[in-house]
Image (cartoon, coloured by chain):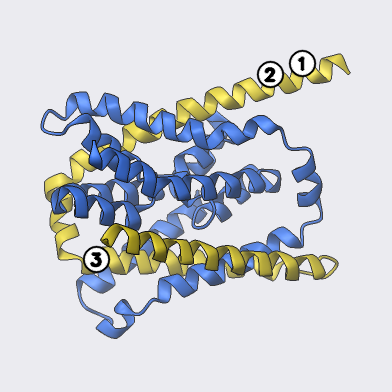
Amino acid sequence: MGGRLILKRETMFIIAIILFMSTGIFIGYRLRNKETGVVSHIVTGFIWLLLFLLGLEVGGNEKLIKGIYNFGLEAFLLMISGVIGSILASWTLWIYISRNNQKKEEKE
Amino acid sequence: MKGSLTIVGFFILGIIVSHYNLLPDSIIHADISFYALCGLMFFVGISIGSDTSTLKNFRQLNVRYALLPLMTILGTLAGCIIASLFLSNRSISDCCAVGSGLGYYSLSSIIITEYRGAELGTIALLCNIMREITALLCTPFLVKYFGKLAPISVGGATTADTTLPIITQSCGKDIVVISIFHGCLTDFSVPFLVTLFCSL
């Protein structure tokens, strides 16, 4: 039951985000001949706010702070192995695509 | 690099502020982060829409880039299987469940807590927060040595929202579409993968 509830909320969440972004793209397209340099500063500001809020969540969670002492190393090992695995996998794809592009250019 | 350090600075500032109760509880429990994320996506949308070259790049995109989400998932799982050899008290399915959060810490930790208890849920939360921070910090380094796809793969399920702006800055706007496509697809696959490995 719980799982299904979470899924429903997550779906709403993703739909809301996609809607906000599509609206932004539409407005951005209408503004494309105007100066929009200030937008990148606003984006940076929002990222700062989000990471600050993430920090608030982590710092206020006693279980999590204690968890860092107990399971921090385990979590780190799992994170770093997952990250290295995905780097190697994406690097393979990157090399494969780059080589194919080169071949195409040589033909032309 | 300076940009990523500022970001981590704000993260640490947040930890300190809430650890010493410097803000009233009502602020912490409000859904501000959801609204902030909506605001972020709106302005990221504007910056994509106002860039005339994005649409052109979209047409020239190589179909093979569509394989990237699959590479991310397979690479992460392979890494977690290897890590499970070193963690004698955790099963392979436990490690894969934690890893398949792909940086989506909120959702994956909730599902894992429900199926496997608070201990593995906490590990999932820690592991996936660390993944997001790693993606934020290492993007410039990853682009330099492992190509433009590496930061997207490391960012996992966060590449359509929180790590998108950094990826855009480091990889260029032609990569934006791949990043969003990758983020949406991995985002949707997280609940299924985590539930799958929890039930094994």
> Which type of secondary structure does the marked residue at label 2 adopt?
helix
Q: What is the CA distance from the residue labelled 2 to the residue labelled 3?
A: 47 Å
Q: Are marks 2 and 1 in contact (CB under 8 Å)?
A: yes
Query: Within 10 angstroms of label 2, few (less than 14), some, or many (20 or more) residues?
Result: few
Q: What is the CA distance from the residue labelled 2 to the residue labelled 1?
A: 6 Å
Write down the colour of chain B. blue
Question: As displayed, is residue B41 above or below residue B168?
Answer: below
Q: Is residue B159 left or right of residue A63?
A: right
Question: Which residue is tagged 3?
Answer: A59
Asked if badge 2 and badge 1 are on a common chain, one would say yes
Query: Within 10 angstroms of label 3, few (less than 14), some, or many (20 or more) residues?
Result: many
Judge by depth and name the residue closer to the eye, B151 or B17. B151
Judge by depth and name the residue closer to the eye, B169 or B105. B105
Q: Chain of mark 2?
A: A
Question: As displayed, is residue A76 above or below residue A95?
Answer: below
Residue at figure coordinates x 17%, y 59% from the top left: A65
- Say if residue A45 shows up in the picture: no
Question: Which residue is tagged 2?
Answer: A99
Which amino acid type is shown beneath numbered disc 2?
Answer: Arg
Q: Chain of mark 3?
A: A
Question: As displayed, is residue B130 above or below residue B75?
Answer: below
Can you say which quadrant of the picture contains the C terminus of chain B?
top left
> Which type of secondary structure does the marked residue at label 1 adopt?
helix
Question: Which residue is tagged 1?
Answer: A103
Q: Is residue A31 left or right of residue B190?
A: right
Q: Are marks 2 and 3 in contact (CB under 8 Å)?
A: no
Which amino acid type is shown beneath numbered disc 3?
Answer: Gly
Asked if badge 2 and badge 3 are on a common chain, one would say yes
Chain assigned yellow: A
Whichever of callouts 2 and 3 sits on the residue coming sooner in the sequence is 3
